[in-house]
Image (cartoon, grey):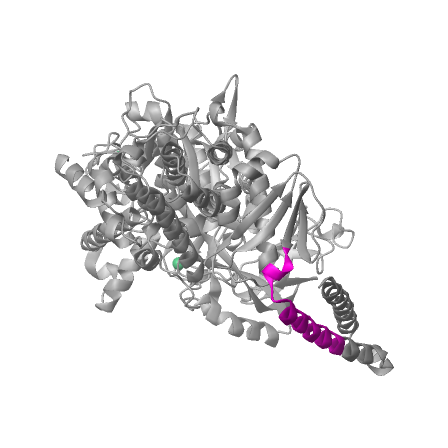
Amino acid sequence: MLYIACLYFKKIKMKELPKAYSSQEYEDFIYQTWETLGLFTPEVNTGKKPFSISMPPPNATGTLHLGHATMLAIEDIMIRYKRMCGYSVLWLPGTDHASIATQNKVEKIIAEEGLTRHDLGRKKFLDRVHKFVADSQSIIRNQVRKMGASCDWSRERYTLDEGLSEAVTEAFIKMYHDGVIYRGNRIVNWCPRCSSTLADDEVEYREEKAKFYYFKYGPVIIGTARPETKFLDKIIVVHPDDKRYKKYIGKEMEVEWIEGNITAKFIADNAADPEFGSGAMTITPAHSFVDFEIAKKHKLEIVQIIDEKGNLTSSAGEFAGKNAYEAREAIVEKLRKKGLVEKIDENYIHKLSVCYRCGSTIEPLVSKQWFIDVNKKVINEGKSKKSIKEKAVSVVKNGEIEIIPKRFNKTYFHWMENLRDWCISRQIWFGHRIPVYYCEKDNNGCGEIIISKDAPKKCPKCGNVKLKQDPDTLDTWFSSGLWTFSTLGWPEKTDELKHFHPTSVMETGYDILFFWVARMIIMSTYHLNEIPFKTVYLHGLVRDKQGRKMSKSLGNGIDPLDMISKYGADAVRLSLIVGATPGNDIRLYEEKIAGFRNFVNKIWNASRFALMNLNEEDLKAEIDLKNLNSADKWILTRTQNLIKKITKDMETHKYSEAGNILYDFIWLEFCDWYLEMSKVKLNPGVLIYVLKTILKLLHPFIPFVTEVLWKNTGSKNMLIIEDWPEFKKEYIFRNEEKKINIIMDIITAIRSIRAEYKVDPTRKIEAVIYSEEHLEVLHEKKEILEKMAGLKDIQIQNKGKPISKSASKVIQGVEIFLPLDALIDLEKEKERLYKEIKSEEEIISFLEKKLDNQGFVRNAPKDVVKREMEKLEISLINLKKLEQKLKGL
Ligand SMILES: [Zn+2]
Ligand SMILES: [Zn+2]
């Protein structure tokens, strides 16, 4: 450790800073120093207030993309800021095993070797997966470090590590005994490709044009987009108030159908819409969520038509065993021959459900799975009980959890209120195995279900030793739902859990509000009776320059790591922060990152200039309040304003705004004004104070370059653990602030006149300035005026006559005259003006002719005519101005 510290000191403390900042030279080294010195690791019981963030765990298989980079940049700003404010700060990193995604990836890899997971068997396949995960994890860790994320690696977790797996089992068992987890036959989203169930929100929708079929079914016409599911439709549902069908309700009748006659029955239910089609519908309970609910309500039989492979079951008669989609046309053809096809609508817009992982069409089907009951009243709340769904809604409604931006409250409530029982079993091998053992009858057992942390040796009821563990694993979101507290040692009551939970902020992309954020709220309020985090900060998606999503197929993606090696992590971080507001997408492109690299260089150069003018003694100089000139007082005041504003922005999560303000302050007030003024008269105490303050305020945004510069300001500590700047009332000088602002306004005005007359920047010009009120400061700052506005021989008087043949301007009562012959060569200028007048006159005559032409005015589009008229108006104004100018000469 000591060795690293010495190395750090040697490497970045320089006698003279090099002209250009090279991020590559310092970044890795500085990160390593921070980490080795243990500066990311908080102490738990020091009496300091806690601030904690659970880092959203990237998938253990992936590589870092821009979404992660954004997350890391924002969270690191929060973390570094709070650390500097003196909090005990924990940012806990980790990775998610992402069962479906990871298993798919490894399946693709072994497919290239001509193998399937079944060829390898469960154990060998999982060995391959674990090896693959270990490799990716070390890549991800390295990438997170490249971004400068100051997270506590000593507490890194993985959703499948031992402790977290124990937490998962514990959570399952508790929920099972509370009756919240149950096993049942329910309809689920099934992906035939992945051979697994999917959660409702893992299903994506794609609109496509499809056929919509109308069939004669006994006395009614029924409509469907999926004839292949209709073999056993036997129930005709009509609205109870529908007069057309009243006489049929409760009756049975023989109906001719796909595989011969079947007995159909009419039932009444509000689910039937009398306005839609014929007002009557048949139901397919095994393959439609809506129909399933109706069937359960009326206690109807539920029979599977399509199996887990997407093939038709024996219920489909002669079509049994065929792929459901491929059989569709043949089924319709059969019905047509029977004269049962009423019509086919070819332009039906169908919302197709597809798997979010592999894109295959989702098959809703009934299956025996494990579910979490979201409506059972199990959470004690005073005298009453709440369901996990009600509880999750109430903690956001009552403000315990704040979502930023607020507008996402509405989407959160909408999603929660429509939440169905959550199917948590997956037919995936990679993941947390369900801790359930069956004493199966066909294994000479008694049918007992045993819930157990460890594999039981025998059935507690009948003593049978041939027990079989449930082959399924748990939904990934089940374990990541525990993330905020399982990572802190739960179910043990650790000091970390007590100190850092509830965590302070959950910062993540708005696209996983439901997948993950909502589930963490459910799991934490249920298991700990405590919210998982106080604030949810949602960032937007990163898009390309034209606002398109970045994707492999468009080839418009940007690899954050390429950008880091090219422009430095600081520039990449700024480009993801500045211009981004919570919940809104941002655009990113290389030029933008390059622009921020220039800004980082500007900071380097400004600091370098300041440091070059300070010797070892100066670096230790303090501010002497008795020895300040008005420029010093001005910059001290401006710096206090800056501290106040940035601190407020940090507290209210306005990082983009803070970034912009810092950018402007450094670019304009510090570099353009103060450093320029310092060239005239330098006050080391003030300069080093302002420079250090800026570096501190910038540190959370651009930690690397500020740390390098910091070391060169003669400070002992590393910047990362320095105190956040304090607002100091004694450094506020409103009068001087005003005075210098006037000088700045005068300089700006003179510069703009010079620009207007195209005066060579090196040419010094004379000036006459009148002012009663500001006479004193004008005299005091004469030298600065001369230097910064390029003046010589300034005459400053309280009043006087206007100077003829001069350019003039009045700024806050100060009259400025710049004699024209000093600005320009009069004859040349006259000639130039004649030329400009002539060309303006030509434009006017051309436009007038055009607008006199009735044909043009009548036939051209209105906005074209309008534009031409506007052009004419502008030219007329220009002409007038030019003529006046000429007259003035
Ligand atoms: Zn799939
Ligand atoms: Zn048994």
Q: Nearer the viewer, residue 288 or 335?
A: 288
Q: Quadrant of residue 410?
A: top right
Is 758 left or right of 569, judged from the image as shown?
A: right
Q: Nearer the viewer, residue 87 or 203?
A: 87
The picture places residue 150, in percent across and down from the top left corner, at 31, 39
Residue 208 in sight: yes
Residue that appears at 57% across and 51% down? 291
- Please determine whether, in this image, residue 166 is positioned above or below residue 200: above
Residue that appears at 39% across and 38% down? 682
| Image quarter where ligand 1 lies | bottom left
Q: Quadrant of the N terminus?
A: top left
The picture places residue 749, in percent across and down from the top left corner, at 61, 50
- Please determine whether, in this image, residue 389 is positioned above or below residue 516: above
Q: For the magenta stretch, what is the residue range?
A: 819-843
Residue 423 in sight: no
Residue that appears at 22% across and 50% down? 138
Is 56 left or right of 845, judged from the image as shown?
A: left
Q: Quadrant of residue 73?
A: top left
Q: Quadrant of the C terminus?
A: bottom right
Q: Please, which residue is most extreme toward the top here?
A: 383
The picture places residue 829, in percent across and down from the top left corner, at 64, 69
Q: Nearer the viewer, residue 357 or 152?
A: 152
Magenta residues: mostly which secondary structure? helix
Q: Is residue 822 magenta?
A: yes
The picture places residue 586, in percent across and down from the top left corner, at 50, 53
Is 626 left or right of 443, judged from the image as shown?
A: right
- Please determine whether, in this image, residue 198 is positioned above or below residue 486: below
Count of picture labels:
0
Q: Is residue 149 magenta?
A: no
Q: Nearer the viewer, residue 192 or 270?
A: 192
